[in-house]
Image (cartoon, helix red, strand yellow):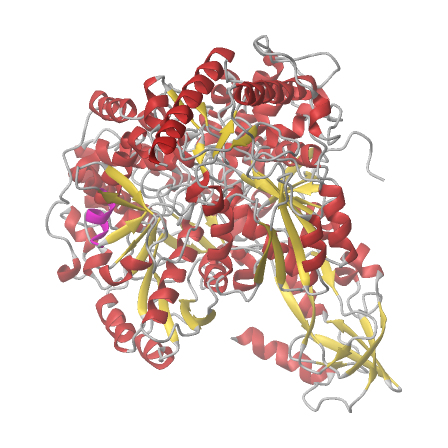
Amino acid sequence: MRYIPKSPEERETMLRAVGCDSIDQLFESIPSALRLGRELRLDRGRSEPEILRYFEERAAENAGDFACFVGAGAYDHFRPSVVDAMISRSEFYTAYTPYQPEISQGTLQAIFEFQTLMCQLTGMDVANASLYDGSTALPEAVMMAVRANGRRRVLLARSIHPEYRQVLNTYLQHQNIALDEIPWGNSGQADHAELQARVGSDVSAVVLQSPNFFGVVEDVAAATKIAHAAGALLVVMITEPVSLGILHPPAEADIVAGEGQSLGVPLSFGGPYVGFVATREKYIRSMPGRLVGQTTDSRGERSFCLTLATREQHIRREKATSNICTNQALCALMVTVYLSVYGKKGFRELALQNVAKTQYAQKKFLKAGASLRFSGPHFNEFIVRGEGSRGLDAKLRQERIIGGLDLGRFYPELEGDRLFCFTETASREKIDKLVEVYAAHELTVHAAQQQRS
Amino acid sequence: MADHIKKARPHVNQNEDLIFERSSAGKCAYQLPPLDVPPADTGALGGFTRDEIPGFPEVSEMEIVRHFTRLSTWNYGVDTGAYLLGSCTMKYNPKINELVARLKGIANVHPYQPQEASQGCLKVLKLLSESLLEITGMDAITLQPAAGAHGEMTALLMVHAYLASQGNPRHKVLIPDSAHGTNAASAAMAGYKTLNLPSNSEGMVDLATLERLMDDDVAALMLTNPNTLGIFEERIAEIARIVHARGGLVYMDGANMNALVGVSRPGDFGVDVLHLNLHKTFSTPHGGGGPGAGPVAVRKQLEPFLPIPTLIEKPDGSLALDYDRPASIGRVRAFYGNFGVLVRALAYILANGAEGLRESTEEAVLNSVYVRKNLEDSYELPYKRPALHECVFSDKRQAQHGVHTGDIAKRLIDYGFHPYTVSFPLIVPGALMIEPTESESKQELDLLIDALRSIAREAEQEPETVLHAPHTTRIARVDEVQAARRPILRWKPEPRT
Amino acid sequence: MYPANFRYSKEHEWVNVDGNVATVGITEHAQKQLGDIVFIELPGLGAKLEAGKECGTVESVKAVSEIYSPVSGEVTEVNTALNETPEWINQDPHGKAWMFKVALSAPLWDELLSAEQYEAYLREEEGH
């Protein structure tokens, strides 16, 4: 096997050195009845060209090079070439968690930069070194709020990513934390009158997503006032952090958590992505996940190390703030490189291009006779009302377009409505084509309905 | 540098400030294509806008490349040299894995693409699932958990759901004192109290104690096999019988699966549910702490409780994701798992085939046994039973000279190696936990053995050299106490007040 | 090493009683076991403590230890300076690193040890 660095002779020498006649002898501590005694029923080992061909064939069965107008928690942004070039340095990607700071300063400094960037983006004081993804960052943030103030009821906007809410339900099923939903209003923002009515002194946290699942920007400051008046924390989830290039950061909130995939991490059919949680200084010790801190070495040089580890599972075991061990460090590095590339000016320009493409698409849809579901401010996603879009996907695929998520799968009340996303990668030509196909499809659906009635 | 250090040499490059400190106004590393639509109307954003982000970096592309390249050279990876961390399985990460994970049509597939347009991805999931089931001897699997600890939580939620369906979810989980810390934390998240199961004098599960503690309120035994001493629990069949007799389940932490692949299957020795760490056994890179993947494989009776979605084959032969599973524990994450990691693991399995996988296991065990044999004279071996893929020494002899496992680890850095796992498992005071994996050559292992023997001599003859190590790294020993007492967790433009 | 006028718990706290007020801290042995202390969580003013129950934590870089109150009563004073300078616990555990004062609500616990008994207990623990 080409990954094994040993000649037959060396193997023999080593076997003799440990006093064994055969390899099998090494496994004598496994009772023979429990040994497999046959080869695994898997194929023979394949050469590189064969492996490459296998995956190229699989890739060809996916619609890989289509224009993608779906977001919904995973965003198609351009990834500058520098990102992959840097994360392909094998000193980064073949390293373990930086337990030995003297030979891990690269990873540690990069994570310190990541933590700083996430603070700058969100307006928070501290950010952790990453969590699995945005969906698992939600329960981590909720459990953190519960630890911080000891209350056990949480109000959750229904406009938070539906899969995130499902994950939250799974995590909390045995934790004695009650969940309650806040509906959305006509603007698509969380209904603050409902929030006001439901919040109370038993509520640990109010959780919003902004921009929410429908692309609508929430009024975080106003929601925070309501939450704080009841002594509850405000938690803001972010699934599209490119929005923070132009949108006011949720600096009024107490905890900001979410998904960093937008910032240089490939779509990769849903993962690996990179979750994060950021908060105010006073909640540091309730935070889940690893933290990197600045310190000095014994010669007084600035250096970095993992710190405040007593919150974590390897020390506090069942009382830890989370069970997380492996995180998403390499994806966090992608984010760090990506944000360094765009920087202060570029990140804002990037966000503005997303807004411009989205506003253009909104106008095209309206002109084609479609109507938009919500009136609130949108970043790069919006919902087009639909009569039932069966058959649309196939027509779009003929034009090499993936477009519009039918919301019926998550919200029965929005059956037929489609959630579209337009990032900087959307070309005017493809947007025009999308709207043309959509309008034609809706017309035929209408005609068919009228015929029936 | 000391004469007895054979190969390692310090090397030169410039110091590198934080990216923020390299910044100056007007530098940039980006260019967006010209906008082909009218510019954004920020007035439509409801007044929720911000200015440029203060403190955000402004640097050129060349500086970014230098910055991260220099940082990378301060790291130590598997590609740099032997990475001895026990229970971490730091094996070689094949390069073809990286190539295929970045293919167009793999790396850029949106998770909500219609299933008809994602058949290639679903086929990858299917082949990997089938391969892992054959390797583990289990009946069903979910590939979704993002890491080992996430898999543990997923598995325990399934245990809870299954036992509840049998009438009583129970309240306790038994965890040996040699277990990973995640076990206890994961059990707590699944609503279980943990009960400590003390090991016997041989470092193994004590059957009498297990018999005594195993009652009708214990949901599961969480067992690592081989355990964190590298020792196979040879009475595993009896252990499973005891647990099953009281209606409990046997959970296996698969962190040490690299000792078993192709040789012995958990499904054949009584395990009901286990997680695998694809970033350990199946060669996907650790990335400086992640991402990983922690699939959970189960026996038939637990299958209805797998997280949604599961993979199914439709009558027309196409693949689909099934969300309609009323007994499921629910969703454990958005989308379907760390797909990019799963691709790499499958590439590794394809490259090895049945024979290569077995051979890798054999070589991993041979390497560990060889290291153990050659170091027995220099270091205390607290548990003498034959071990498989890793070996655990203690610093008992060196501690007499004031030198502890953490110091030996730092000194090993000077010799050009990434240290072993320090002070774990907890049942060995002053533990040195070494897992060489199959990826080390005889030359590299001989060099390692020389180094550890040399450090044992230094501990006796010149303990100060060991106590102040490392001496050859870019920075000296890091003050972790200061970091924790006065936490500085981010850069700020002005001095902190 | 261990002041004769203090009493000691098997969880390694010390108590110094003056009239109805008990001053509590952790022992030299405890600080040594933990190593460099980086963080401390103490009971709040007015907290009602019960002998033998958890009332705070002490943390070093790689260990956490609970503080068990050796006495019952109400907390009347807390040494908040320790929040800023936890290193005092390493430097002077029986002196300026006292942790809190308690107005006793019950007679002292029988199980508390004298200095001599505590030192014998430590020797015995080490023997294991």
Image coordinates of residue B380 in percent, x first then y, are: 41, 58
Residue B443, relative to residue B157: is it above or below?
Answer: above
In the rendered image, the quadrant that contains the C terminus of chain B is top right
- Magenta span has B133? yes
Is B465 on the left or on the right of B155, as rendered?
Answer: right
Image coordinates of residue B223 in percent, x first then y, are: 35, 63
- The part of the image, by quadrant, that contains residue B207 is bottom left
Magenta: main secondary structure equals: helix
- The part of the image, by quadrant, that contains residue B492 is top right
Foreground: B264 or A446?
A446
Image coordinates of residue B338 in percent, x first then y, are: 40, 39
Image coordinates of residue B457 in percent, x first then y, are: 47, 46
Residue B217, relative to residue A151: is it above or below?
Answer: below
Q: Is residue A421 visible?
A: yes
Q: Is residue B197 visible?
A: no
Q: Which residues are magenta?
A: B131-138
Foreground: A138 or B417?
A138
Is B381 on the left or on the right of B264, as rendered?
Answer: right
Foreground: A323 or C37?
A323
- Magenta span has A38? no
Q: Residue furthest right?
A: C19
Identified at 60% across, 32% down, the residue is A241
Residue B481, relative to residue B490: is it above or below?
Answer: below
